[in-house]
């Protein structure tokens, strides 16, 4: 059986090739040594992506990137068998992925996988972080991780009533749901630095969690007596801790209010999404992404809070 490849897979070292891929799901369609049209390979797909099944018209992108050694300098699909209608592939839509249950944001942020630091900025970012913490414990087939979540509250912003509303929507048992979120509040930047750099990796291993949320990462870095040199020393320790932890879990951090050290965090981000209030709604602006073109979307907060996925009765 042929194997699907995706642009966000770990790149190789050495060979650079032109990779054509579906902008909807990042499924690789063709690898070419020289830049040029897709040609007959595209025709064999009947105009649809083999990953997500959506039309490819206007949804094909190309980038020059390093590729793994096992990727051939050729079309990655056995074209004659595809033309015969033999189903060689499992559609990406059939493969469960962690999501927020809200397509407007999922399409900008995906793939939400381990190995990534996703940074959300803007006042509503804390709400999205709590939504992610809740969804992590949902079953994989419902877009969750079937996992506990570690929630570090750096600015004393967590809202238990909001989390309870998510639990009620899904008809989960509140006590059981709360047990699957380990919450830790920090009150000084030294506490934050120590927690992330020295203890977080062990906690991820002990809890077996696949999601770490650091809400208001810079919330304690606004003390008037804080010297910039000392702040950046602690931030280096924080960054080293996050880089270690993200090898084990997806790390989601929020910057709900502007801070002079924002650039230190955003430079390390694999994905950066700004969520700003605009004309009574929310404007989501993708400012940085390892694999996707920058894009945006506008929606109402109520739409986000209602779109938490299918119910699960217990």
Image: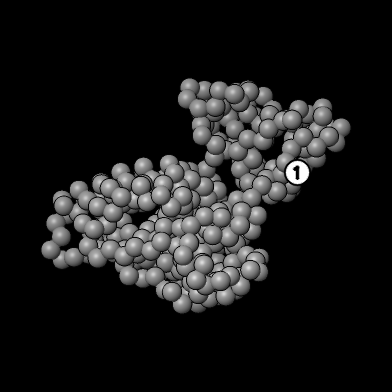
For residue 235, above or below residue 7: below
For the N terminus, the quadrant is top right
Q: Which residue is at a point 24% across and 65% down the rendered structure image?
A: 187
The type of colouring in the image is one colour
Q: Quadrant of the C terminus?
A: bottom right
Residue at position x 38%, y 63% in the image: 183
Image coordinates of residue 312 in percent, x first then y, are 65, 66
Residue 59 seen: no
What residue occupies the far right of the structure in this picture? 84
Q: Position of residue 287 (x, y in %)?
A: 45, 53
Residue 38 shown left or right of residue 184 in the figure = right
In the depicted view, which residue is nearer to us: 47 or 78? 78
Q: Residues within 10 Å of mark 1 (few under 14, many from 20)?
A: some
- Give the number of marks: 1
Residue 210 rendering spot, x and y as whole percentages: 48, 50
Note whether 201 is above or below 134 in the view shown: above
Q: Is residue 150 left or right of residue 139?
A: left
Q: Position of residue 3 (x, y in %)?
A: 68, 32
Residue beneath the point at 51% across and 31% down? 11
Q: Nearer the viewer, residue 164 or 35?
A: 164
Quadrant position of residue 8: top right
Q: Can residue 162 be seen in the rendering of this structure?
A: yes
Residue 29 falls left or right of residue 178: right
In the depicted structure, whether residue 41 falls above or below residue 245: above
For numbered disc 1, what is the local secondary structure?
loop
What residue is pinned by disc 1? 48
């Amino acid at each position: 059986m042929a194997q699907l490849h995706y642009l966000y897979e770990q790149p190789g070292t050495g060979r650079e090739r032109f990779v054509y891929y579906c902008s909807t799901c990042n499924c690789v369609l063709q690898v070419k040594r020289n830049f040029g049209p897709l040609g007959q390979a595209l025709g064999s797909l009947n105009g649809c992506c083999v990953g997500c099944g959506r039309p490819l018209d206007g949804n094909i992108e190309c980038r020059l990137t390093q590729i793994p050694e096992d990727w051939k300098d050729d079309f990655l699909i056995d074209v004659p068998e595809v033309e015969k209608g033999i189903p060689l592939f499992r559609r990406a839509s059939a493969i469960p992925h962690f999501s927020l249950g809200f397509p407007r944001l999922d399409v900008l942020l995906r793939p939400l996988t381990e190995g990534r630091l996703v940074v959300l900025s803007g006042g509503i970012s804390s709400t999205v972080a709590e939504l992610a913490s809740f969804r992590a414990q949902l079953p994989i087939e419902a877009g969750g991780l079937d996992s506990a979540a570690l929630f570090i509250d750096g600015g004393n912003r967590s809202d238990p009533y909001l989390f309870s509303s998510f639990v009620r929507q899904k008809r989960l048992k509140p006590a059981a749901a709360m047990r699957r979120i380990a919450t830790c509040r920090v009150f000084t930047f030294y506490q934050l630095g120590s927690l992330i750099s020295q203890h977080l990796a062990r906690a991820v291993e002990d809890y077996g969690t696949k999601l770490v949320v650091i809400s208001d990462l810079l919330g304690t870095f606004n003390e008037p007596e804080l010297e910039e040199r000392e702040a950046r020393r602690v931030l280096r320790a924080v960054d080293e801790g996050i880089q270690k932890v993200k090898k084990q879990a997806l790390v989601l951090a929020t910057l709900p209010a502007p801070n002079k050290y924002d650039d230190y965090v955003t430079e390390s981000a694999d994905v950066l999404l700004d969520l700003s209030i605009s004309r009574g709604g929310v404007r989501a602006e993708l400012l940085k992404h390892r694999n996707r073109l920058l894009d945006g979307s506008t929606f109402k907060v109520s739409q986000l809070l209602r779109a938490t996925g299918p119910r699960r009765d217990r």
